[in-house]
């Protein structure tokens, strides 16, 4: 369970998050939807304690992220990139992460297998393609077999087979009872996997509810999104 | 905490650059003793060497470069971009996700670094002094254990200084350039010393008083005072770095 309550944040004197509040519940995939620059990544970084909020709280299973002594056993998170130093092999990266949270080193090979990177375990992370980096980031998130997953734009850079794999994986995780929160600017993609949707625009949450509730009388989530955000479709951009 | 230290050790020693630092640090000083042996014999013969017990220590000072690299890389590796696909992504994200308590993280990082560098300093000092003994025999008397300890302490403190400066700058290139230029090409500290004798208490000048006897300075600072002053400098830099790290977004 993730509870974000009236989070505000400014950067370079502009307010980028205005009283952002929403919840992500266990057993459901919550899609965090918004155009580029809406504040999705910023919200997730506050949730993970990477950036500090000016006010408001963000709790994971009742505690701030930094309050968990071995956080990887509670929350698995993957943001931009793999997080692995480019000179390190995928396995070496996962091993130090496992060590830091008291997980057995054998978990490294297990999660590499889970994301289909077994053959690339000894390859340096700097030589990974965008899709492979995303998989490695996901592998690190899965090390502690956490009940909560937080993923920023997880399908970015994946090929069609990868996108399909990710969709199945996320649905399966929610079916197992996990809390799954993922951000995306791709409405079509989100409409396929999300149970609940939170729409953010210019730092404010403009809609939240089940997929059906947010879609409302519009024929698709995409139509609802443009109506909510007032974004005009510019075919030339 | 033990887990975090173990993870930081694994992380540091897994980096190719850090391994270069370990090897350079151990090899440079003994190599210099050997290469400089003929020139050193001449200066011992014509009496221009100064205090001969300083000899091994002077060579040790250059091996410090290896330790400096370790101090810098321990932090700079967190801030370098992890790939061209996502220029903003850095290892620090993975690090703080795994260990969100920032002061605990820094303490573990510094401890891992001190363990590696102290071991490196010990091995290098033993090898360099033993080799000096073999090459020059009785012409160079063996230094006291206290001076050897002072040299290793200096080695560790300078590394922590590099660690702190890199954390403040969030960039390793700046730290390495400043520290290497200052110790090899022009010493800003020595230039300042020409202006005011107080500059003798700057960290890179005061530190060597712990183990070098014939410094080219008119001020003489006792080894223990030197050690305390240098430790205070390093502590101040570490506290400033930790305070910034604690407040900053990443
Ligand atoms: N370091 C920064 N300095 C100033 N503005 C920033 C910084 N990082 C992000 N922003 C701004 O914050 C807003 C939200 O960004 P972000 O959370 O990355 O959006 P999203 O992930 O939804 O695309 C954007 O307008 C962006 O320009
Ligand atoms: Mg984003």
Image: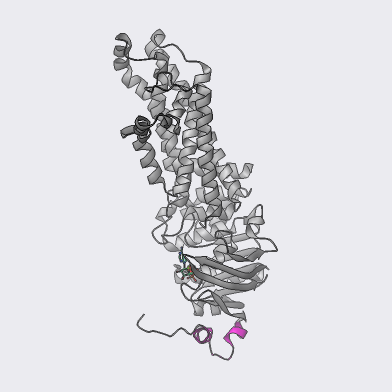
Residue A61 lies left or right of residue B145; in this view the side is right
Q: Residue at x 61, y 51 (%)?
A: B101
**Total labels drawn:** 0
Is residue A216 part of the magenta span, yes or no?
A: yes
Q: Residue at x 37, y 30 (%)?
A: B193
Q: Position of residue A99 (x, y in %)?
A: 59, 47
Is residue A170 part of the magenta span, yes or no?
A: no
Q: Position of residue B129 (x, y in %)?
A: 44, 18
Above or below — where is B91 with respect to B162?
below
Above or below — where is B96 with respect to A172?
above
Magenta region: A211-228
Task: Give the main secondary structure of the magenta stretch.
Answer: helix
Above or below — where is A36 with respect to B213?
below
Q: Position of residue B63 (x, y in %)?
A: 40, 29
Residue A191 lies left or right of residue B56; in this view the side is right
Residue B208 lies left or right of residue B106; in this view the side is left
Q: Nearer the viewer, residue B152 or B239?
A: B239
Quarter of the image for residue B203 reads top left
Residue at the outermost right position: A62
Residue at the outermost bottom position: A217
Q: Nearer the viewer, residue A127 or B127?
A: B127
Question: Does residue A167 show up?
Answer: no
Quarter of the image for residue A144 reads bottom right
The quarter in which the N terminus of chain B is drawn is top right
Q: Position of residue A44 (x, y in %)?
A: 56, 65
Q: Nearer the viewer, residue A83 or A5?
A: A5
Q: Residue at x 45, y 25 (%)?
A: B124
Q: Nearer the viewer, residue A164 or A79?
A: A79
Question: Does residue A10 show up?
Answer: yes
Q: How is the image coloured?
A: one colour
């Amino acid at each position: 369970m993730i509870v974000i309550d009236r989070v505000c944040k400014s950067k370079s004197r502009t307010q980028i998050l205005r009283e952002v509040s929403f919840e992500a519940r266990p057993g459901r995939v919550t899609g965090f939807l918004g155009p580029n620059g809406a504040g999705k990544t910023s919200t997730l970084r506050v949730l993970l304690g990477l950036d500090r909020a000016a006010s408001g709280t963000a709790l994971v299973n009742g505690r701030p992220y930094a309050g968990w002594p071995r956080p990887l056993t509670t929350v698995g998170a993957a943001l931009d990139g793999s997080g692995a130093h480019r000179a390190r092999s995928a396995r070496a990266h996962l091993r130090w992460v496992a060590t830091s949270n008291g997980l057995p080193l054998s978990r490294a090979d297990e999660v590499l297998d889970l994301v289909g990177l077994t053959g690339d375990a000894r390859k340096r992370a700097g030589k990974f393609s965008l899709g492979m980096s995303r998989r490695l980031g996901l592998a690190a998130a899965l090390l502690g077999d956490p009940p909560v997953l937080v993923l920023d734009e997880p399908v970015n850079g994946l090929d069609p087979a990868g996108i399909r794999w990710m969709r199945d994986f996320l649905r399966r995780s929610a079916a197992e009872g996990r809390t799954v929160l993922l951000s995306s600017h791709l409405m079509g993609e989100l409409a396929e996997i999300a149970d609940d949707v939170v729409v953010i625009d210019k730092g404010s949450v403009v809609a939240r509810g089940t997929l059906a509730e947010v879609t409302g009388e519009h024929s698709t989530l995409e139509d609802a999104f443009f109506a909510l955000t007032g974004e005009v479709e510019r075919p030339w951009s | 905490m033990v887990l975090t230290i173990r993870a930081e050790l694994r992380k540091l020693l897994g980096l190719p650059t850090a391994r270069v630092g370990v090897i350079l640090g151990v090899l440079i000083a003994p190599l210099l003793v050997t290469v400089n042996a003929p020139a050193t014999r001449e200066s011992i013969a014509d009496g221009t060497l100064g205090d001969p017990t300083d000899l091994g220590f002077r060579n040790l000072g250059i091996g410090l470069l290896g330790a400096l690299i370790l101090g810098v890389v321990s932090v700079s590796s967190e801030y370098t971009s992890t790939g061209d696909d996502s220029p903003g992504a850095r290892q620090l994200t993975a690090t703080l996700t795994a260990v969100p308590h920032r002061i605990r993280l820094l303490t573990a990082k510094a401890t891992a670094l001190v363990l590696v560098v102290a071991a490196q300093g010990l091995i290098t000092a033993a090898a360099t002094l033993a080799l000096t003994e073999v090459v020059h025999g009785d012409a160079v008397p063996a230094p006291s254990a206290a001076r050897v300890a002072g040299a290793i302490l200096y080695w560790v403190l300078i590394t922590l200084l590099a660690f702190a400066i890199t954390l403040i700058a969030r960039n390793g290139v700046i730290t390495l350039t400043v520290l290497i230029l200052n110790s090899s090409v022009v010493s800003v500290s020595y230039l300042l010393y020409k202006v005011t004798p107080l500059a003798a208490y700057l960290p890179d000048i005061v530190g060597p008083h712990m183990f070098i006897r014939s410094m080219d300075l008119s001020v003489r600072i006792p080894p223990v005072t030197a050690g305390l002053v240098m430790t205070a400098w390093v502590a101040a830099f570490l506290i400033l770095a930790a305070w910034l790290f604690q407040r900053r977004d990443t």
